[in-house]
Structure formats: C-alpha cells, structure tokens
Amino acid sequence: MTEVLLVGWVFLIAVSYKAAVAILIKTKSL
Amino acid sequence: MFELDLGTVNWARAQFTLTAMYHWLFVPITLGLSFLCAFYESIYVRTGKEEWKRLTKFWMTLFGINFAIGVATGIILEFEFGTNWSNYSWMVGDIFGAPLAIEGIFAFFIEATFFAVMFFGWERTSKGFHLFSTWMVAIGSNLSALWILIANGWMQYPVGMAFNPDNARFEMQNIWEVLLSPVAVAKFTHTTSSSFVVGSLFVIAVSSYYLLKGRHVDMAKKSIIVATVFGLLSSLFTAFTGDESAYANAYTQPMKLAAYEGLYTGSKGAGIVALGVLTSGKKIGDGQDPFTFEISIPKGLSLLAKRELNGFVPGIEDLVYGNKAEGIMPVSEKMARGKAAITDLAAYKAAGKAGDEQAKTAAIQRFKANQQYLGFGYLNKPEEVVPPVASTYYSFHFMVYVGTFVILLLALFLRTAFTNKLAESPWLLRFGVASFFLAYLASELGWVVAEVGRQPWAIQDMLPVKMAATNIGAGHVQATFFIFFVLFAVLLLAEIKIMQKQIKIGPEGA
C-alpha cells in the first residue's frame, strides 16, 4: 500500500496541473 | 526509581506545543502554495502571457512572507530536542536524528538555493531555469516535510532499530524500514495533501476577497480555478490517506484509535460514531456509557480498522485490562515485565563493572526476554496508558467534519467557476474566505490527534514522555516559554500586517 500512496501523491500533483489547464482552456480563461 | 519533576515535563510539553502549533501556522501554506506557484508559472511559460507572470509573482510574494517565519520557527523546534528533551535525544538520537539531519542538509538546502533564484532570478535567468527553480522550491519544501514526517512516523511506530544495553541507546539497524514504514508513508501523504488543501483555500480566500470587492477580477478568477482543482483533488486524496492512516493506527496504535473513536469496550462488528457527545467525567472501568448522545454507523469501525464487517476492534478497557480471548496482554503484566527488564539491565551493568562475565550473560538473557516491555516499566499504574480521550475524540471528529465540508465546498466552487458565475455568487465567496480559517484549525487539530493520542508515550510503547525530558528546573523552561510566547505573538502580528498590506496592494505591486 505504501507504493500506492507514494505513486498516488505524484499523480495528484501531475493530474491537478493537467486538469487545471484543461478547465482554464474550457472556460476560455487561459 | 529515577523520575523527572512533572512540572518540568509539563512546561517542556507546553513549550513544544506552543512552538509546534505556531510553526504549523506557516507550513501548510508553504507546502500548498509552493506547488500552486509552480502551476501558475508553468502556465505563464506555456502561454507567454504577462498577466500569468504578474499573477505568479503576486502569489510568490505572499509565499515568501509566509516562508521566512516558517523556517525560523522550525529551527527552534529542532533545538528544543536538545534543550528540553535531552533524555529523548540521548536514547533515540541515533535514529531520530538521521531524518532530521537529512532534512537540513538535503531538502532544506534545495529549498534555500532555489528560493533565491525564484525570488531574484526573474530577469537574470532564462524562463526555463526560473521555472525549474520554482518547481525545485516546491519539491524541496515537500521533501523537507517528508523527512520530518518520517521522524514523527517513527515516534508513532518505532521500527528498524535495536536497543544497545551497553549505552542504553536505541541504534539504527535498517534505515529502509524507517523510511518506508507504512505509518511514515501514510503520515507524509496525508499531511502534505491536507496542506495542499489549506494552501489552495488560502488562494481561494484571498481571491474571493478580491471578487467581493470587485478588484483584480480576472486574476482572481484564474487563481481560483487552478486552486479549486488542486484543492478538490487533494481533499479527496486526503480522505483516502486519512482512511489509510486510521487503518495503520488499528495495528500500530490501537489505543489512539480507540481514543479518537471514543471506544471503551471492544467488540466484533464495532460501530463508528458519526456524531456523538462524550459523557463528561467518564473514567475507564466505571461502567458509565461513554456517550450521552450518539449517532453510529453499524459495523463501520470494524470495516475501517480491520477491513471486515465483523472484525474485532479493541476498546480502551480491552487494551488496559487485557482480553484473553483476543490475545491482548493486560498493561499490569507488561509493567511487571518492564520493571523486570529494568532490574536485569541494572544487573547487567553491575556485572560488567565487577567483571563477572557469567552473571553478565545471565542478566542480558533475562533482559532480552522482557526487553520489548522496557517502556512499561516506567509507568506507575496501568491506566496511565490512556491518552486524554475528550481532546483526541473531538479534535478527530472536527477534522473529519471540516474535511467533508471542504470537499463539498470545493466541488461547488468548481461548478460555479465552470459556469463563469463566481463574481455573482457572494455567499459562496464569503464561505471561500471563512473556510480557509476552518481548514487551518482542522489542520492544527490533526496534530492534536496524532500527538495527544500517542500520550503518555514520546515513542509508542517504548519511552514515556515523563522519562524523555531534560532534568532541569521548571523555571528555566518557564522563562523561555514566555520569551517565545511574546516573540511569536510579535512575529505573528508583523506577518499578518505585512500580508494584509501586500494583499491590499494586490498583483500590481508584485
């Protein structure tokens, strides 16, 4: 489970950035 | 038996509490805002638009104000291990000191080096290198947290070491066990992701304030969108890692779990109290109902702690008085074995001094049979192993309520941002400002659960707090407590003033 948590943590940061950019594009705020 | 003056111990406790909780006013914003600054600058580099650069510099300015005091108070904490907790440092410095030293010479140096580039390198370095520096500050800050939380995780679940009877110290045997302990990893991911939520709510609070005032509207909306996405995903991850932390507690610190769930009598298929008021004056073994009012979810605690509906979850009374059917040894027996271990350790040392090898070998064999109960030998009565239940229980439940509320609030923020109606939602924006302070409080209370719930131990089942402090007069600690109190109050007021001034100036002044 420790691996899942650590990989999940890295994914959290990467996915947050990707999702934020996608929503900025979608709302024409970029 | 040698025992420290409780006045000294409690003043040392108070001083550490003051410093740690004050330090924690700055850390969550550092951890969360550092990544948000990296996100904002990445968008600037991607788009090349000046408005994103201005926005990034504004949040970096607020990050810098917060960072300075956070560092200063963190250093005080490390010194307190030497001044107020020297017995602790003596006994476990070999293990506890390693992650603290790595944090200083590795993670903090990364932060400090790239922090300078991040602040003063805008016109002196390339866009790419500046962006790299900002990411390194974020990664370095979180690596700092990693090493500190590994050290704290080891206090909750001591692994990877052996006791050396010749110098009465615990010594490192396997650093990987310490670094990758399930408690340390759960603690790191839970603490940092919850700090991402606090950092995101800081951005949302300041931006909501701007939108309510009708100032910097475009910048505030952009800031909110990025912070809301980061905050919402982080709050969901925090719930997941919080569940993992509780699951780890069930095996490594069952007393802490029982305290924050208000569970006095263990059972199979134990329910979880979703909402409840503890009976005031409730004492262990007094037969009173622990709750004056409660709403429980049947079998919920067994599912959380054992991952099965009918798993047995021990209560406070099982853990103190023992439960033969479930194989739980009573504390009184652990104390007897611990006291025998202390006696055998003294006999081992005496035989060594006298040069009696036969007696030395016999003493160490007897000692090793009871070594794991050594810490219990310093307790005076079995009930001492029960932490303050009310503060642990209420802190935990408040933290969970706020966590749930924040998930819903951020989902609402995201929906409103998506439909571009943020500026027309004053009530939501007011909640955005207020929720930051609520999340702050929940974050502090998380540490209350972790540390108060571990009492009376400095190191779980190994070293009681009352044996860990430095044997100096309470007056010394008292004096520095009040000096720190005044100093911290002045620093906090100064920080709030500078922060307010910078927020009033806004991104134009960044």
Image: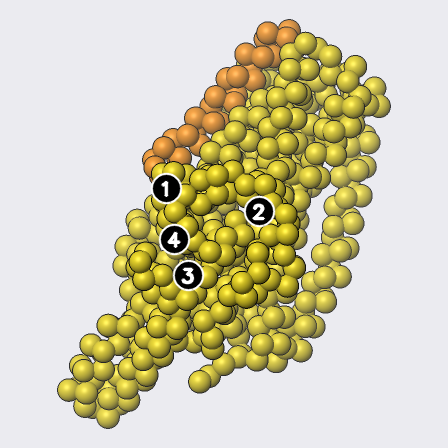
State the residue position of label 1: B310
Inspect the image, locate mark 1, and give the three-letter code of the amino acid beneath it. Asn
Colour of chain B in the rendered structure image? yellow
What whole-number distance in Å separates the C-alpha atoms at marks 2 and 3? Answer: 20 Å
Q: Mark 4 — on which chain does it sit?
A: B
State the residue position of label 2: B396
Q: Residue furthest left?
A: B358
Residue B319 is marked as 3
Q: Residues within 10 Å of mark 1 (few under 14, many from 20)?
A: some
Rendered position, B491 above or below B477: above
Seen from the viewer's position, the closer of residues B352 and B367 is B367
Question: Does dot 4 land on a helix, a strand or a loop?
Answer: helix
Question: Does dot 2 land on a helix, a strand or a loop?
Answer: helix
Marks 4 and 3: same chain? yes
Seen from the viewer's position, the closer of residues B405 and B117 is B405
User: Residue at 59% of width from left, 7% of height from top?
Assistant: A26
State the residue position of label 4: B252
Inspect the image, locate mark 3, and give the three-letter code of the amino acid beneath it. Leu
Question: Does dot 3 land on a helix, a strand or a loop?
Answer: helix
